[in-house]
Image: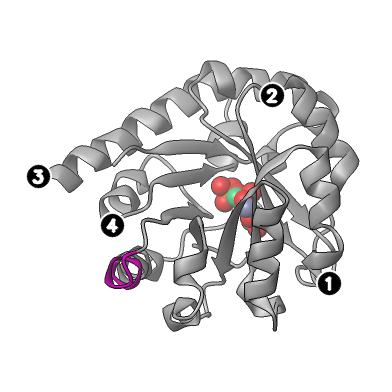
Amino acid sequence: MSVRLAPSILSADFAALGDAVAAVERGGADLIHVDVMDGHFVPNITIGPPVVRSIKRVATVPLDVHLMIEEPDRYIEAFAEAGAAMMSVHVEVLPHLHRTVHAIKALGAQAGVVLNPSTPVAALEEIAGDVDYVLVMSVNPGFGGQTFIPRSEAKVREVRALLDRQGSRAAIEIDGGIDLANVARVVSAGASMIVAGSAIFHTPDPERAARELKAAALAGVSALRR
Ligand code: DX5
Ligand code: ZN
């Protein structure tokens, strides 16, 4: 298993996003995680397609767009056109999740589904075979800088078991409260896409923080092999 680091620009300086992206790319970022919030599904409001389009112009790695919004079907086309290579949607907002997942794929992007901390793993049962990745939220979505919910580690293992049972090779992404202290553990539980915001951007040197976090994540991969 390889591990991909996806720094979340939510915790970066929005007046200098280009610099933030360049710094974490030098530090080994494999993806840029973009948090889209609508003030309805989650309390916060962040950014939309125009900002994604601007980031796309400067980023050299794929953009991983996390849609924390109601009615994502209304926006996926705009985000795909803006340059999203991957888009994830929350199972909690979608009565027709299968349709949305396939609409994302039809736009040429990879499709992910997201589980809030209180959403059972069983919510994946009927969609596991259709998705490219599953995002396990390890905080309640809406804000950066929250504390990792310990139960999430076991949840990653349960998601991996469900995917394996169904013969799915979908990747598991984890998002929320990831730092140097817990990253190896979540990787050894089966997460291979690691989102981190404040642990990277709320440090004096985001490039170095990204490099250290990725090294720590890779230590978790070796634990997995043992
Ligand atoms: C939370 C967002 C996360 C957030 C992570 O709602 O989905 O991507 O930026 O930030 P940290 O790593 O600070 O918890
Ligand atoms: Zn996110």
User: Which of the labelled discs sits on residue 25, or is there none?
Assistant: none
Task: Tell me where the magenta segment starts and ends, as one range.
Answer: 161-167
User: Quick one: label 2 or label 1, which is nearer the N terminus?
Assistant: 1
User: What's the CA distance linking mark 2 and mark 1?
Assistant: 29 Å
Judging by the rendered image, the residue that carries numbered circle 2 is 59
User: Which of the labelled discs sits on residue 40, or is there none?
Assistant: 1
Q: Is disc 3 in contact with disc 4, using a CB cutoff of under 8 Å?
A: no
- Relative height, residue 136 to residue 87 (above, below): below
Residue mark closest to the camera, 2 vs 1:
2
Q: Is disc 2 in contact with disc 1, using a CB cutoff of under 8 Å?
A: no
Judging by the rendered image, the residue that carries numbered circle 3 is 226
Judging by the rendered image, the residue that carries numbered circle 4 is 189
- Relative height, residue 141 to residue 194 (above, below): below
User: What's the CA distance linking mark 3 and mark 4?
Assistant: 13 Å
User: What's the CA distance linking mark 2 and mark 4?
Assistant: 30 Å
Q: Amino acid at mark 1?
A: His
- Characterize the local packing of mark 1: few (<14), some (14-19) or many (20 or more) Cα atoms within 10 angstroms: few
Q: How many marks?
A: 4
**Residue 165 on image: x %, y %:** 28, 72
User: Quick one: label 2 or label 3, which is nearer the N terminus?
Assistant: 2
User: Quick one: label 3 or label 4, which is nearer the N terminus?
Assistant: 4
Judging depth in this view, the residue of 160 and 41 nearest the camera is 160
Q: Amino acid at mark 4?
A: Ala
For image coordinates 69% across by 72% down, the residue present is 99
Which is the main secondary structure of the residues drawn in magenta? helix
User: Quick one: label 1 or label 4, which is nearer the N terminus?
Assistant: 1
**Residue 92 on image: x %, y %:** 65, 78
Q: Residue furthest left?
A: 226
User: What's the CA distance linking mark 1 and mark 3?
Assistant: 44 Å
The image quadrant where one finds the N terminus is top left
- Relative height, residue 219 to residue 207 (above, below): below
Residue mark closest to the camera, 1 vs 3:
3
